[in-house]
Amino acid sequence: MNRRVVITGLGLVCGVGNTAQEVWEKLVAGASGMGPITGFDTTGFPVTFAAEVKNFDPLNFVDKKEARKMARFIHFAFAAAQEALEQSGLKITEENGDRVGVFIGSGIGGFEIIEREHATLLKDGPRRISPFFIPATIINMAAGQLSIRYGARGPISATATACATSANSIGDSVRMIMHGDADAMIAGGSEAAVTQLSVGGFASMRALSTRNDEPTKASRPFDKDRDGFVIGEGAGILILEELEFAKRRGAKILAEVIGYGMSADAYHMTGIAPEGAGAQRSMRAALNDAGIKPEDVGYINAHATSTPAGDGNESRAIEIVFGEHATSHKLKISGTKSMTGHLLGGAGGLEAGITVLSLINQVLPPTINLDNVDPECKLDYVPNNAINHNFDVALSNSFGFGGINATLIMRRWNEGSE
């Protein structure tokens, strides 16, 4: 069954902007979304900053009564999905609703509601727990609520594979369409984990940067002075369609998804296999799935969280898989988490969207704060300033705790793509 899958819409929400266009403009300008945390009192916390979504009103996307029944990660998913659907022009009707599905994941779900209701339990007892506590927080409810909103009655699912979540959501959705289970999917991920327990927990692991006095300079992938990631929030959602389905309705095609790879490190709970061995397998699997050679890839949006172990191992994995194509600096790489922070389960969706925008605009967003490249990182990371770049194929990496690796490969769409 030769069913090709294309992208016809995308919606992005993160610390640098609340729409895809705003996000893109800020990234190309090298703007940082980091700042002091406003969502809770950070007194006593070792980390006091994050990449929060700013000036976001959920009532622009869902009515007040319903909004109260949803956690913040669901609000972000509604915003990104609405933007993506509007761009795609896809109308979900009684006739096609059985063939349109939703696959949206989250690494953590409604953490802020869990914290709030636990405090209510301790203070006022179990009878005061909200009846909406469970449906507001569970990870599958972003997908569930969106299917209800739009009448999408096709396949529905939700992944929770840590920081690989939304890359898995997109890749698995592509395979559903290729297999004939659906003609279109609303796919991606959403996260809203800038909360007391989340920030406190990641800080206790010493996973977060502690540059409290310089938030905008804290996320610095591939820099020798990196000291951890910056937690972010937001969502990234794509509209995926079977090529002929999209063409029949006259959709404008943004890009094609041509490869998807997964692998397990089978190594450590939170650590990374030496030389990014799992990442190597994931990238090779995606290249094999796409049926292309390493030298066909022009750009990689790296996972690049700004952790000491993560960036070096990912860079080494790219070096091994892509060889001279990478070491000669023909292959360009950037870490956009340097500006957006790390959206955890939403990262893969956000970065897939950014990668599509890079293909469309033939511009690569930079890795900001890359002042002193780690000697172990020997490739071209597009330091500090965006560049024009002529390329047709791009790869996006997402890696999660538990040794979960996911890679997506997308191709620029033009007349010759058919």
Image: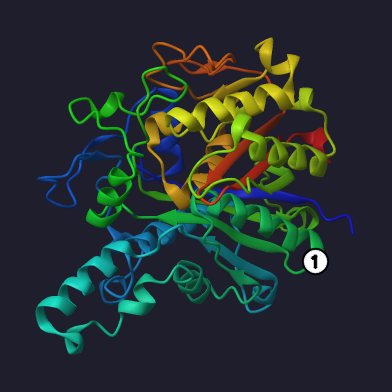
Can the viewer see residue 361? no
Image quarter hosting the C terminus:
top right
Task: Answer left or right for 400 relative to 25.
Answer: right
Task: Answer left or right for 217 relative to 167.
Answer: left
* Coordinates of residue 66 in the picture (x, y in percent): 32, 75
Residue found at the far right of this picture: 1
Q: Which residue is at the front of the view, 118 or 389?
A: 118
The amino acid marked with disc number 1 is: Gly
Q: In which quarter of the image is residue 299?
A: top right
Q: Which residue is at the front of the view, 405 or 336?
A: 405
Image point (55%, 76%), residue name: 151
User: Please, which colouring scheme is shown?
Assistant: rainbow
Task: Answer left or right for 155 relative to 22.
Answer: right
Q: Quadrant of residue 408?
A: top right
Image point (58%, 15%), residue name: 380
- For label 1, the crowd category at 10 Å Cα-Cα, with few meaning under 14, some 14 to 19 and many 20 or more, is some
Quick one: SS at disc 1? loop
- Counting every numbered tag in the picture gives 1
* Coordinates of residue 145 in the picture (x, y in percent): 45, 73
Image quarter hosting the N terminus:
bottom right
Q: Residue at label 1?
A: 180
Q: Which residue is at the front of the view, 260 or 124?
A: 124
* Coordinates of residue 39 in the picture (x, y in percent): 19, 51
111 to 26, vertically: above or below: below
Image point (75%, 69%), residue name: 181
Task: Answer left or right for 173 relative to 352.
Answer: right
Can the viewer see residue 66? yes
Residue found at the far front of this picture: 267
